[in-house]
Amino acid sequence: MTQESLYISFGPVQSFVSQARTTRDLWAGSSLLAILAENSLQAAVKKGAVAVSPVIPSQVSKKGTPNGGRTSVPNLMQVNCGTISPATIADIMLKCWTDLWSKICNGAWKKLATAVGTSVPNGISQVWTRQVEHVWYSMWAFGQYDDLRARKCIRDYHYQAEPGRKCTVCGEREALELSSQHKARLGAEGIRLDEKERLCAVCFIKRTLPLLSKDPEIPELRRLDAEAFPSTVNFACISWLRDVILSQEPTLKEAAKDLLHCLRDINAERVNPLSPNWSKNASDLKGLLNFNGNYFYLHLYTTQKLLGHNQQLDKARDYCKRLLESSKKVGIVGPSSYYAVLLMDGDNMGRVLSANETKKPDISIALNDFADNTYDIIEPLGGRVIYAGGDDLLAFLPIDMVLHAASDLAASYSNFMGNLQLSGGVSLSISAGITLANMNLPMGRIIKHTHYLLDDVAKEYSDGHTKKDAFAMQVWTRSGPGVRIVKKWQSKSQKQPWPIEIMGLVDAARQKRSPPLTKGFLYSASDLIAKFERIPQGDEDVLLELLFVEYFASRVKEVEELNETEEGRAMVRELVKTILELSRIDYAQRPGVVRFNKDAPLMIRFLASGGVSE
């Protein structure tokens, strides 16, 4: 038999992962998919097939995967079957996926049965069986990658309507009817369910994954780093904690030390701490990073998030209030109410793979190295990778670091892929969607919106114009989606990538560099750009002059001094020109017309505020 390539894909992916209420739920869904995929691929290799895309991480990882707790195998795989029938390999991979999923389900069921008691109601058992047996689908084809793409066009959807009250996490499947007593027992076992929370079987399994990773009967999960995953509030407050911990102001240090000792004394909830670079040589106060970020927000001491702790919580609240007041006195405003979700995906990967069949192993190794390198970029900035596999990435970061991370990741991707000398004339670029989200918003909605920013804004437009090699960033306040910017990573007229240029503008808005950007000017600039949203090509200088004049309308002393010298005026003109270029819409331009985005100055203003107030 001639050698054939088997292409196999499992799903669902996006909907399965995004059905999450907490960051740990999100991590669990992503990790489950990657573990199932990796074990399926390993089963094919053990049978004699050769993994082409992706390569098995343990064969090439520099970080010691599979023992590093990282999951990175995507749901789409290609293997060369040699003399073995592709159908046989497909059956082996499908069976491995199904068997491991069943083992995980059985482990979760034992946890549930222990809490419910020996006599599990038939209703719960029936709901559980129905739901866990209808989660996954698979598609495969052998020959060329285009054959799998054609197969996807004829896939069947078997949607089964779910009766009863729905799960509060996914909102689709029927919830398991668990009493308050059952939830209390589950909580005692380490499976946390809020009083008003209802979970279906699938979402319950995700919630139990940290415990299942320690189950000796499921060794495939053992390598997962299942410590308490940082919540959105930890990503929101870490930049404020950095300024507090590194401060040398005696009163502030004393207030921080008192809160740290109090949290230790009351055995406050801990998390797997973020590990930014600055914490390595920080004082003992870096111990604050070990605790749930809720303890650093005064208003959260009176909400459900901190109820149930011992009576000494009132003392912690007093220390928190003192710390916040002390930090404000020395100019450290915060903590922020926002965190960043970063989603990245390689552009034109299907075309790249189709045009370079013989180089797929090299492409897979390069993508694996890129995925491995994402941890070295994101974690030192105070972020955490949820998933990095192939050309896909999902991560959480503080909002003041997400543009640095995105820029470095785009450069890293170009570096790893650019060394391959691929054919086909396809751009080896990557695009990103970034949501700057309020920490109190539903997780699933934020993830879905970030996918929209990546797939429908940074990559494609409904009017048929393709962008790609770009990033789309939007603020999502408690009122809904807010200001948004969309730019290529780098314009021909810019010396640096746009993310770095934007951070420079943010520093100017924070009065950290000259010329400064005042709050009043940024609002006025947005109003002016809104009035001149569409102008004839060639008239851009008119808008530039208007913005230049508006800048000097400020009564700020430093602005007035800049207006007194030619050098100062030249610096301001360059600054205003950068803002105008940032506002320029690069896509879907009509002949003879230039369009501008009024949100660009407001985005600078938001980033400069650190998301402390909406």
Image (spheres, rainbow, N blue to C red):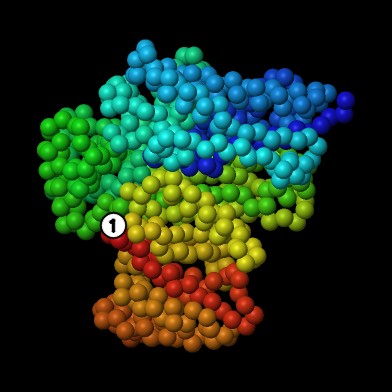
Question: Residue 506's image quarter?
Answer: bottom left
Q: Nearer the viewer, residue 174 or 335?
A: 174
State which quarter of the image contains the N terminus: top right
Q: Residues within 10 Å of mark 1 (few under 14, many from 20)?
A: some
Is residue 205 rendered to the left or right of residue 46?
left
Position of residue 551 relative to residue 145, above or below, is below
Q: Nearer the viewer, residue 593 or 367?
A: 593
Q: Secondary structure at mark 1?
A: loop
Q: Is 200 located above or below residue 574 in the figure? A: above
Q: Position of residue 118 (x, y in %)?
A: 37, 12
The residue sitting at 15% across, 39% down in the picture is 316
Residue 54 appears in the rendering: no
User: In which quadrant of the rendered view does residue 200 lie?
Assistant: top left
Image spot of residue 567 (x, y percent): 40, 81
Q: Residue at x 36, y 83 (%)?
A: 550
Q: Is residue 181 left or right of residue 168?
A: left
Q: Residue furthest right?
A: 1
Q: Amino acid at mark 1?
A: Val
Q: Quadrant of residue 42?
A: top right
Task: Kindly identify the residue that appears in the image at 12 percent across and 32 percent down.
Answer: 311
Asked if residue 211 lies left or right of residue 304, the reply is right
Residue 301 is situated, as x and y percent measured from the top left of the image, at 19, 42
At x 61%, y 60%, the residue is 460
Q: From where the camera sits, is residue 306 visible?
A: yes
To which residue does mark 1 refer?
A: 612
Position of the C terminus, as image quadrant, is: bottom left
Residue 220 image offset from top left, x and y in percent: 53, 21
